Amino acid sequence: MSNTETSITSARASVMIYDDTNKKWLPSGTSSGLSRVHIYHNIQNNSFRVVGRKIQDHEVVINCAILKNLKYNQATPIFHQWRENRQVYGLNFSSKDEADAFAHTMMKVIDLL
Ligand SMILES: CC[C@@H]1C=C[C@H]2CCN(C(=O)[C@@H]3CC[C@H]4C=C[C@]5(CCCN5C(=O)[C@H](Cc5ccccc5Cl)NC(C)=O)C(=O)N43)[C@@H]2C(=O)N1CC(=O)O
């Protein structure tokens, strides 16, 4: 993360990607487990992205831009998802409170893009 980016929210979640071929969710990265997922604001170009790193070994398991027509789907109180290009991402939050806080910021970001 460059120093022109600030974290505007973060949450603990397991980051999943959808395997469209086998129609199932897979953990993003080399193993399943909790990550610290941030929304970073790049103040130089006023852009935003979701970056998540595994809590255990800091592997980056998600790094995706938040673009203006992103549809953020809160499928359940703790499982939220969205599509980017051909990839579907899922965040399985460790608590409803963290899911709510993350979603609140995500929706505000989408609104201002
Ligand atoms: C981590 C396990 C996981 C936990 C929670 C539940 C919650 C529901 N759920 C799903 O996978 C639901 C069930 C049907 C399936 C069918 C298709 C999927 C998969 C791919 C995307 N999708 C869409 O429905 C997207 C959503 C969307 C709407 C609007 C904007 C963006 C998006 Cl992404 N709709 C379009 C039109 O793209 C999907 O989410 N699906 C999860 C789930 O069962 N499990 C348990 C397991 O898998 O064992």
Image: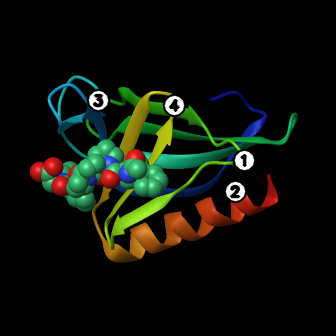
Callouts 2 and 1 close, C-beta under 8 Å: yes
Which residue is under mark 4?
63
Query: What colouring method underlies this structural image?
Result: rainbow
Q: Quadrant of the N terminus?
A: top right
Q: What residue type is labelled 4?
A: Asn
Determine the residue positioned at 42% across, 31% down.
87
Callouts 1 and 4 close, C-beta under 8 Å: no
Q: Is residue 50 at all visible to an observer of this figure?
A: yes
Marked residue nearer the N-terminal end (3 or 4) = 3
Front residue of this view, candidates 33 and 25: 25
Q: Quadrant of residue 61?
A: top left
Looking at the picture, how far across and down is residue 80, in whole percent? 39, 59
Marked residue nearer the N-terminal end (2 or 3) = 3
Determine the residue positioned at 41% across, 67% down.
99
Which residue is under mark 1?
68
| 107 on left or right of 26 | right
Marked residue nearer the N-terminal end (4 or 2) = 4
Looking at the picture, how far across and down is residue 43, in whole percent? 84, 41
Secondary element type, mark 2: helix
Identify the disc placed on residue 110. Answer: 2
Q: Answer yes or no: disc 3 within 8 Å of ligand 1.
A: no
Nearer mark to the viewer, of 2 and 3: 2
Q: Which amino acid does label 3 sit on?
A: Asp
